[in-house]
């Protein structure tokens, strides 16, 4: 242990310490840069560019440690995001009142009229999993898209200390309509 460095640090009043520097590219800006880069991937234009809302959810079970300790979940998840082709990126206030960010790829092989169903796989953060850091996810979902408007419905099944929920996210198409 370097006692000299410890003494020098301890003798500087808090108001005179150099503030910690933050990256100019914060986490949300990094997600936006990644989403724009993904828009140049093949097939992204065929799927469209969509601006998405936060989520509105209904928790179907209430067995988690968080619910037992707090007695409630947030059901209105304020936030927003973008879908570029099959790539989704965004942020929202999650069920346990923490900020979450996500980056996923949607594989939706099932189609019926304006409906498409499949799974979105990628990463998500802001929960107790991985100490609030990013962790892998695979989320079943159905999309309904008609001209400039659409919605995503997701289902999170009950798993360990995660309560089941169903949520809806609204979206508006930003690019031309080719259907």
Image (spheres, rainbow, N blue to C red):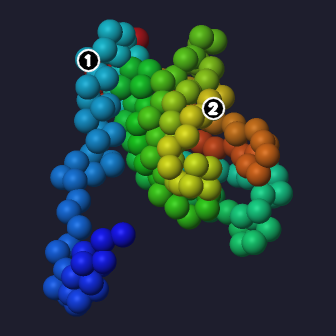
Relative image position of residue 125 (x, y in whole percent): 51, 47
Q: Tell whether 75 sits left or right of 169.
A: right
Question: Residue at position x 47%, y 40% from top?
Answer: 102
Instruction: Compare marks 2 and 1 and give the one earlier in the sequence.
Output: 1
Q: Which quadrant would residue 6 be assigned to in this image? A: bottom left
Q: What element carries label 2?
A: strand
Q: Circle 1 sits on which residue? A: 40
Residue 166 vertical position relative to residue 148 in the rendered view, above or below: below
Q: Can residue 163 be seen in this view?
A: no
Q: Tell whether 88 sits left or right of 129.
A: left
Classed neighbour count for the residue bearing mark 2: other residues with Cα under 10 Å, few (<14), some (14–19), many (≥20): some
Question: Residue at position x 27%, y 84% from top?
Answer: 7
Residue 25's disc is: none
Relative image position of residue 57 (x, y in whole percent): 64, 50
Relative image position of residue 162 (x, y in whole percent): 73, 49
Q: Is mark 1 on a helix, strand or loop?
A: loop
Quadrant holding the C terminus: top left
Relative image position of residue 95 (x, y in whole percent): 62, 58
Q: Is residue 87 visible?
A: yes
Quadrant holding the N terminus: bottom left
Q: Tell whether 160 sits left or right of 51.
A: right
Q: Nearer the viewer, residue 73 or 103?
A: 103
Question: Residue at position x 47%, y 57% from top?
Answer: 99
Q: How many marks?
A: 2
Between marks 2 and 1, how big is the CA–CA gap? 24 Å
Q: Circle 2 sits on which residue? A: 139
Question: Residue at position x 55%, y 17% from top?
Answer: 107
């Amino acid at each position: 242990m370097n006692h000299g460095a410890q003494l020098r640090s301890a003798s500087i009043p808090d108001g005179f310490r150099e503030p910690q520097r933050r990256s100019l590219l914060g986490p949300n800006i990094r997600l936006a840069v990644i989403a724009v880069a993904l828009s140049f991937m093949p097939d992204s234009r065929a799927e469209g560019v969509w601006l998405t809302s936060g989520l509105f959810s209904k928790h179907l079970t209430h067995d988690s440690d968080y619910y037992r300790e707090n007695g409630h979940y947030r059901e209105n998840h304020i936030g927003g995001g973008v879908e570029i082709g099959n790539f989704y990126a965004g942020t929202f206030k999650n069920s346990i009142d923490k900020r979450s960010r996500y980056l996923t790829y949607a594989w939706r092989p099932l189609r019926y009229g304006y409906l498409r169903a499949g799974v979105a796989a990628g990463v998500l953060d802001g929960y107790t999993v991985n100490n609030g850091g990013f962790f892998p996810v695979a989320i079943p979902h159905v999309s309904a898209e008609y001209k400039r408007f659409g919605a995503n419905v997701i289902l999170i099944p009950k798993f360990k200390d995660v309560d089941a929920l169903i949520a809806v996210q609204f979206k508006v198409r930003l690019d031309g309509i080719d259907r």
